[in-house]
Amino acid sequence: MNFELLTVTTYGIIFLLWSSILYLYLSNIRIASIRHSSVAILLTILAIDAFRTVLESAYFGLFFSSLYDYLPVSVYQFLSQPGYLMIPKFVNLAAAMVVLVWLLKVWIPREVDEQAEQKQKLDESSRLLELTRFSVNQVADSLFWVSPEGKVIEVNQTACEKLGYSRDELLNMYVCDIDPDFTADKWPDHWRELKANKTLHFTTKHMTKSGEIIPVDITANYLLHEGREYNCAIVRDMSYQTELDNIIWRHANYDELTGLPNRRLFNDRLNEAILTANRNKSSIGVIFIDLDHFKDINDTYGHDFGDQVLLKVANNLKAAIRDSDTLSRFAGDELAAILPDVSQPENIQNLLNRLLNSITQPVSVADKKVELTASFGVTFYPEDATSSEQLLINADQAMYKAKAEGRNQVYFFTSALRDAINHRVSLVRELREAINNHELELYYQPIIDFRDHQIFKLEALLRWFHPKRGYISPADFIPLAEDNNLIIELGDYVIDQALKDLSAFKTFKKNMVIGINSSPAHYKHQECVTNWLNKITDAGFSGSDFVFEITERIMMPDIHNEIDETLKELNQAGVKTAIDDFGTGYSSLSYIKRFNIDIVKIDKSFVMNVTNDAQDQAICEAIVVMAHKLDMLVVAEGIETTEQYELLKSIGCDYAQGYLFSKPVNVDGIVSLLKTTSSL
Ligand code: C2E
Ligand code: CA
Ligand code: CA
């Protein structure tokens, strides 16, 4: 056996094997496969080398020495072998060393690196998966994954919480079990539409496990994943939004204090009621309710107290009406009610009695008890009007009528009232025309000085001789002018006319004074009085040629400041002021004096009975005494008899006015009176 050949061949094979390990390592083959191949090759090398060593040892009897071939101790033997055998052995040894070092230093750490890398990748992806799952469960919106058949196949935590079902329960449900409007038969069409559009956005309702309905906003997304189709629906709970909408709606339609429908909602309800009444051929009652003198409560106790009273009154009224009726608060102390399905006044009389009674129940707020009354105006659909606007106007007018008739009562809108309203409307129009066309005349009534029987002053009184309607009393058209902003124009008209006439009167009596009747509106607009004063000076007269008669009505607290200013201005201009119709209002003389008033005119209602009514006589006497104490002069108006004249003179009145001396007459009448009588 040629052992040398065997050795050379063996080392040749071993060398090739080492080379293949090197190749595997150097070529970019995956590390794991290198490792396995290298280990296999190495084992093969060791096996072949061991086999060679055994054969070689057996032949040379050097078995043991061959064991030292790779050991440093056998370096000598190793070197003592023939030179050509030394080279493969050396290469073999070097290669084995390299492989060992490689395995220990390079492969093993690489393997460790690779494992760490793989573990890191695994950790990262599971972390991301966990984050996705966590996020999906944390989002505020519910998420549903639904199969093409409409079956819920996955949900997030929010979906479970919102609906009150567990995940397992939901995974056994279909969309139609959650959305009551979404019946099973609707699903196929929905799916088709979703597939065509890829995404759908709509609002619907979901029903929770406890049966509560939640409004939801849904964005449905069509998904195709790994060959399977899904609907991934993002469901937003709109309860909050709906609640906000409700709050806004309530704010727009309900009164904040009482929680009653406001005027806007009242109108809507009235229009609805009209439609229903048309269908059912029934009638509707509309009631306006205005609390009497409620302002006094606010003024006396403050607005907070007033609000509490209103709240209680509203609650009492609400308790008195039927559920089908609407009670509304329009503003302040104005309330209104719609009573659908009533026919005639008699039918709602009971209800009205209940309402009246509920108002008159004393109301207690903060240890204080207040008693109230109210004025009611009632109108009917379709008997009195066919539109909601007209019904409101009617009820309002009827309520005003109830107030005018003495308050604390119900007034039904009647055809007579309707006629009266129409009459008023055309009268206002005609009055405007009469002013523009100078059709109004100024009459004058003399006021006599008790001491010398001389005419001291002339009271200017408007006269309207209507071409068709005949004479219209100022007692009728003045309030109309006051209500319709015509009173300012009318005042200017009177001043202009009086200034013209005064020149004529002054030719007979130099110090003639004209009394001008004025209304609260004139004092509310200070520029109006300033304008009059300018007119007076422009015409060459002075303030002392005029007395302005005012009523107690102008002393209302809401225009105190304006009045103070205006009266001061009049005072400075030398214009005297007189309180008209004294005794019919509620003011005391000392209160009136506060406004620097010069003259008090005792109302003719006292004068009328002064001779046969001890009380009226006592009142007249008291007025005179008080007025004089406060430095005011007294006129008694409406004197028709000499007895009245004598009595009023005896109690100390300063001036007299009445038919006894003269009715109001036109300029010519006064001129002829002045011509013929130097004294009366
Ligand atoms: P007033 O200022 O109290 O005027 C006195 C009213 O009593 C006048 O009624 C006069 O005609 C009437 N009268 C005078 N003497 C007697 C009498 O002896 N017996 C009776 N029964 N009545 C007598 P008239 O002219 O109808 O005026 C009614 C009211 O209209 C006035 O009451 C006044 O408040 C208002 N008025 C009249 N003219 C004007 C005006 O130019 N401007 C304003 N703002 N109001 C006016
Ligand atoms: Ca007067
Ligand atoms: Ca008067």
Image: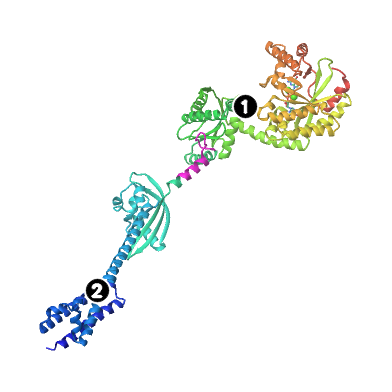
Instruction: In this rendered view, identify the residue nearer to me: 496 or 310.
Output: 310
Report the Cα–Cα distance between label 1 and label 2: 122 Å
Instruction: In this rendered view, identify the residue nearer to me: 635 or 140.
Output: 140
User: Up-down: is 153 above or below 359?
Assistant: below
User: x, y (%) of residue 320?
Assistant: 47, 29
- Left or right: where 498 falls relative to 63: right
Q: Quadrant of the C terminus?
A: top right
Instruction: In this rendered view, identify the residue nearer to me: 470 or 349.
Output: 349
- Left or right: where 643 falls relative to 294: right
Q: Which residues are magenta?
A: 243-262
Q: Secondary structure at mark 2?
A: helix
Mark 2 surroundings: few (<14), some (14-19) or many (≥20) residues within 10 A: some
Whether residue 3 is visible here, answered yes or no, is yes
Q: Amino acid at mark 1?
A: Ala
User: x, y (%) of residue 466?
Assistant: 74, 32
Image quarter for ligand 2: top right
- Which image quadrant is residue 396 in? top right
Q: Amino acid at mark 2?
A: Leu
Number of labelled discs? 2
Question: Which of disc 2 and disc 1 is earlier in sequence?
Answer: 2
Residue at position x 32%, y 53% in the image: 174
Mark 1 surroundings: few (<14), some (14-19) or many (≥20) residues within 10 A: few
Say which residue label 2 marks.
100
Say which residue label 1 marks.
404
